[in-house]
Image (tube, rainbow, N blue to C red):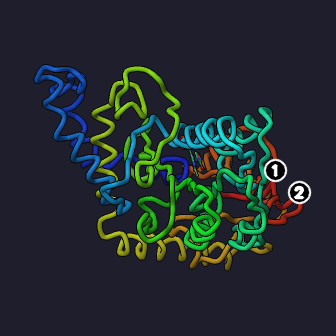
Amino acid sequence: MQVYMDNNATTMVDPQVVEAMVPFFSEQYGNPNSIHKFGTKSHPAIAKAIDQLYAGINAADADDIIFTSCATESNNWVLQSVWQDLIVNGDKNHIVTTEIEHPSVLSTCHFLEEKGVKVTYLPVNEQGIVEAHTVKSFITDKTALVSVMWANNETGMIFPIKEIGDICKEKGVLFHSDAVQAVGKIPVDVQDVHIDLLSMSAHKFHGPKGIGALYIKDSQELTPLMHGGEQMNGRRSGTLNVPFIVGMGKAVELATTDLEKTMASIAAKRDRLEDALLETLSDTFTVGDRDNRTPNTILISIRGVEGEGMLWDLNNGDIGASTGSACASEDLEANSVMMAIGADNELAHTGIR
Ligand code: 7TS
């Protein structure tokens, strides 16, 4: 039997999602921007998917949700447009983020630093989260953007997004959250928290790979990253990927319906596994309090057992796990999130997600 335990890297596409997508490959394949019926026939399905996404995060009518090719694009778009709009064409020069963001945020910040932008990478506490008062203490009148993930992909730890949003609102600073590991796993309500921009990715909640979205509060202006045929009201050019859009809509609907029930059932399994591991193995610990973690995540450390080696053994036993981000798991560096929470070098090589 094969056991797949790497759902933070990606998930299986739900059969109901596949079923919803199929007609848009082979029957309703027209370009939705075309005048003819082959194209316009897909308009209701696109509208439905957009409605499903609005419902999934409780967006308001005045807000915008724009499809992108992935969350990496959504994150790049936010950072590069804020740089263009508020730093190059404005009087700001500073971005606040955390030291444990996904590389799509961190690498873009490094790129912007080369362009002269000042970036503060906030430290995390021993729980692996950034505290709201830390965010507050680094915001200056030159800060253009605060970008803090909703939940971390390696630890599953959930950040105090509501408090950080309130601080950004009070300070008049744009607030972006990479919610890739939160949407479909824990409640995400953009009317309950003050949030300007939010990145999502379908393949993390049983939708297809290669489609993401950016939520934009009050449809505020943002210089496009993709220029071209003026699709999506000119905000993101490129022929709409109708099957994937339909798939993302269906997936978010499935993932957010009865979410509390799903969370409880996944957390129960997670807790059983975690308890068994902690009881059976000595010199073992898991990162972060369970009640502030996404219900599907454990980052476990066994002192003296090197994570990558363990992954190969697990792989030989048909168990798929990860030492952290798959994007970075081929290099044998210490787990940067474990280093950030204060693990020594040896321990930081032992983490298994
Ligand atoms: N943001 C977070 C928090 C992520 O976890 C990932 C993918 C992305 C952005 C990128 O999303 P994409 O739509 O561009 O693929 N994270 C991981 C991971 O943890 N292991 O493999 C991929």
- Residue to which mark 2 is pinned: 345
Amino acid residing under circle 2: Asn
Task: Give the residue type that dot 1 points to.
Answer: Ala
Q: Residue at x 36, y 59 (%)?
A: 59
How would you rate the neighbour count of disc 2 (Cα within 10 Å): few for under 14, some for 14-19, many for 20 or more?
Answer: some
Note whether 115 is above or below 175 in the view shown. Answer: above
How far apart marks 1 and 2 lie (CA) works out to 7 Å
Sequence order check: which comes first, mark 1 or mark 2? 1
Quarter of the view holding residue 97: bottom right
* Residue in the image at 54% along x and 53% along y: 8
Check disc 2 and report its element: helix, strand or loop: loop
Q: Which mark is residue 334?
A: 1
Q: Nearer the viewer, residue 102 or 309?
A: 102
Horizontally, is 349 left or right of 143 in the view? right
Q: Position of residue 141 (x, y in %)?
A: 73, 57
Q: Residue furthest right?
A: 345
Residue closest to the eye, 191 or 73: 191
Across and down, in percent, residue 246 comes to 27, 41
At which x and y percent is residue 277? 64, 72
